[in-house]
Image (cartoon, rainbow, N blue to C red):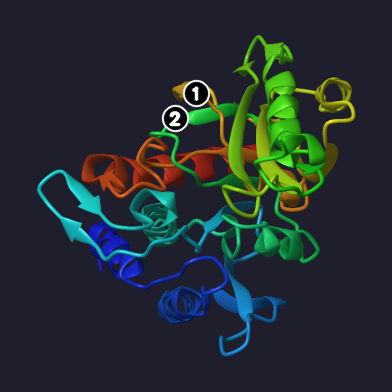
Amino acid sequence: MNVYELTRSLVDIESISENEAAVADYLLAHLSGLASKTGGHVEALDVESAPTGNSARANVLAWWGEPRVTLSTHMDTVPPFFRSREDEEFIWGRGACDAKGIIAAMIAATERLLSGGVRNIALLFVVGEERNSAGARAAAGQRRGSRYLVNGEPTENKLALASKGALRLELTARGRMAHSAYPELGESAIEKLLDALEAIRRVPLPHDELLGASTLNIGTISGGRAPNVIPDSAKAEVLVRLVGDPAPVRDAFTRAVGNWAELKEILYIPAIRFASVDSLPTTVVSYTTDVPVFGRSWGEPLLLGPGSIQVAHTSEERISKRELAEAVGLYAGVVKRLLAMAD
């Protein structure tokens, strides 16, 4: 099965976060066949029980020799699921570039390395990256001695030098219900929330020479009872793409919100600097990955993969066949260089 066929086979298996069992089973079977011919080993690493009615969730690990370099990416996708198709230039479908084409390229690169006698490598495919990094968190406690982790995300086949972090916050405003004809009798939680959001929009955000500017997204707003009722509650979720220390942003937002709303931190992921390999083109990405959750448990991290983040998570998700083919050679070359550095 070539890299295009494997990409389409993987895309056609629905694996929205928390429903990765079918694609994990497929990869276990596929890699077991490869391992049996090449002296490798394959294992399902338990992560957690899935929602009622689904199979337990597990990461998939395959290795040859004593792993020094691990190629890793995620099996889950965002909704909605849609099947693959292809034309002369692209393979389309949910997960085509984020990250099932990457899985296919990593497997093809491993096959190429094994056929050339290379060992001490591993493949690690994890669950839950799109939701809460549950697979990476579990894998961080199941380390196997790897010195380098090549994490796969869409970077257009450029080595990422750094990725932004994330700070997710929830704002909750409280008010008092009243008939909307007599607003003086109530207290609008929505108006308080709007004031709080406008205040944080005016907060200057940090800038980094490499990563650029921090950015703010107001992702959700909810609240109220009916058009003719003064709202007693309202809530918003915001996400800051961080370029450095989160403390100044937390403090500035807390001061800005004041008494208008309660500010609660939901998630923090630090910005990351990655290792690089000489002569390869580089980039900087604004999204977050599993790498901060892995830490250094599977080795010093690098970030590299085919595909463009600009079409990931969209109805136009696709991956260039040219980039897929190039990625196979890139991954194989990077692994060889890292193995030499690990000795």
Left or right: 204 as drawn, with respect to 33 = right
Where does label 1 land, which residue?
283
- Where in the figure is residue 21, as x and y percent of width and height? 52, 79
| Residue that appears at 45% across and 35% down | 155
Q: Amino acid at mark 2?
A: Lys
Q: Report whether residue 11 is seen.
A: yes
Q: Report whether residue 276 is seen.
A: no
- Where in the figure is residue 12, as x and y percent of width and height? 30, 70
Q: Which mark is residue 158?
A: 2
| Residue that appears at 70% across and 48% down | 179
Labelled pair 2, 1 in contact (Cβ < 8 Å): yes
Please rate how many residues cluster around mark 2, counting C-alpha atoms within 10 Å: few if below 14, some from 14 to 19, many from 20: some
| Residue that appears at 36% across and 41% down | 307
Q: Amino acid at mark 1?
A: Thr
Secondary structure found at label 1: strand
In depth, the one of 319 and 252 nearer the eye is: 252
Secondary structure found at label 2: loop
Q: Residue furthest left?
A: 88
In depth, the one of 260 and 17 nearer the eye is: 260
Left or right: 9 as drawn, with respect to 51 = left
Examine the rendered structure and indicate whether residue 272 appears above or below residue 143: above
- Where in the figure is residue 199, as x and y percent of width and height? 74, 20
